[in-house]
Image: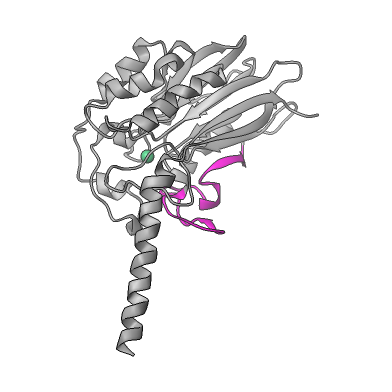
């Protein structure tokens, strides 16, 4: 009996060890490019390609990740949107900018995530089952990461800082109104700073945030933003084969923890195309949990096309 129990324990340890080795050595570097078509433009407009990147959590030695990000320029996106958690090490700004490389010559937008402000700390991933990681930030009041330098590097390259700010971008001859919020996971979002109806004359009304919190997205939708981009979820942090995400680490329904979805709400009326939400499962991992499982690291090419009807 005892030997059977020991055998079962040994098998469980071997399966667990194998899964960890696969998740940290294979899947963590098995980058995926996702593609979605989003029918959100008015009839007659030419398609617009948006490259959505998020949650790189870059540390200076992740050379495979850096060169994969750099290679995404070959997709020739018209606009790049970075929804935060770009760095996970104080020395990672230069490597991150080098990874972006030629993408910085394209129109771009960014917001911060909590990990751009606070250095990573060890956390038991099982805790995500009963609480979000926002709790871990409650006792950390002063950011210890060089986030102003990170933001300055991207704005110096011409990218729009959308942290609690609105702006206007021209990309592929389209006029895009952009509004974004700072990280809601650490309560830095100030939607009131960007509140108000989006310009109906804009070809696209784009809402950008790190964490897809319903309290923020409901207001974007009510103001007429028709495409919302977010990251933060890491596809659910924990995913089970054939089931999917168990949690979203925020107020979002775990079934929407990654991919493209219709977002309910808004102001339906003549010509209202509704609101679409794309959540990126992200490119990286916390340095303290260097593993991806059933959720390959990803970037997404969204091709916006005219809506039907
Ligand atoms: Fe993240």
Quarter containing the C terminus: top right
Closest to the observer, 14 or 204: 14
Identify the residue at the far right of this view.
Answer: 309
Quarter containing the N terminus: bottom left
Quarter containing ligand 1? top left
User: Which residue is pictured at 42% across the width and 22% down the height?
Assistant: 162
Locate residue 141 relative to residue 162 in the image: left or right. Answer: left
Identify the residue at the far bottom of this view.
Answer: 1
* Residue 228 lies in quadrant: top right
Closest to the observer, 187 or 82: 82
269 drawn magenta = no
How many marks on residues?
Answer: 0
Give x and y (percent) for residue 140.
Answer: 20, 41
253 drawn magenta = yes
Give the magenta range: 236-265
Q: Is residue 184 above or below residue 51?
A: below
Give x and y (percent) for residue 139.
Answer: 20, 45
User: Which residue is pictured at 30% across the width and 23% down the height?
Assistant: 95
Give x and y (percent) for residue 101.
Answer: 40, 16
* Residue 163 lies in quadrant: top left
* Residue 189 lies in quadrant: top left
């Amino acid at each position: 009996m005892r030997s059977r129990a020991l055998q079962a324990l040994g098998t469980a340890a071997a399966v667990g060890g194998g899964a960890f080795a696969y998740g940290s050595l294979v899947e963590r570097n098995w980058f995926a490019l996702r593609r979605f078509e989003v029918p959100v433009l008015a009839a007659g407009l030419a398609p617009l390609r948006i490259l959505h990147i998020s949650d790189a959590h870059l540390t200076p030695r992740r050379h495979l990740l850096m060169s994969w990000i750099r290679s995404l320029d070959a997709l020739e996106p018209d606009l790049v949107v970075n929804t935060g958690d770009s760095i996970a090490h104080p020395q990672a700004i230069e490597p991150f900018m080098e990874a972006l490389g030629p993408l910085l010559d394209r129109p771009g937008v960014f917001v911060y995530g909590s990990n751009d402000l606070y250095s990573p700390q060890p956390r038991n991933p099982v805790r995500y089952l009963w609480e979000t990681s926002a709790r871990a930030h409650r006792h950390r009041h002063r950011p210890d990461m060089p986030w102003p330098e990170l933001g300055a590097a991207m704005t110096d390259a011409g990218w729009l800082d959308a942290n609690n700010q609105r702006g206007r971008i021209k990309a592929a001859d389209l006029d895009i109104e952009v509004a974004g919020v700072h990280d809601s996971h650490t309560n830095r979002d100030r939607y009131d700073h960007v509140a108000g109806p989006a310009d109906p004359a804009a070809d696209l009304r784009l809402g950008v945030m790190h964490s897809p919190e319903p309290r923020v997205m409901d207001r974007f939708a009510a103001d007429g933003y028709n495409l919302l981009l977010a990251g933060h979820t890491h596809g659910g942090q924990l995913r089970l084969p054939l089931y999917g995400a168990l949690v979203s680490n925020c107020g979002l329904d775990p079934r929407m923890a990654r991919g493209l979805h219709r977002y309910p709400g808004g102001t339906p009326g003549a010509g209202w195309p509704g609101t679409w939400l794309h959540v990126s499962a992200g490119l990286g991992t916390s340095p303290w949990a260097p593993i991806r499982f059933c959720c390959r690291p990803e970037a997404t090419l969204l091709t916006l096309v005219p809506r039907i009807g």
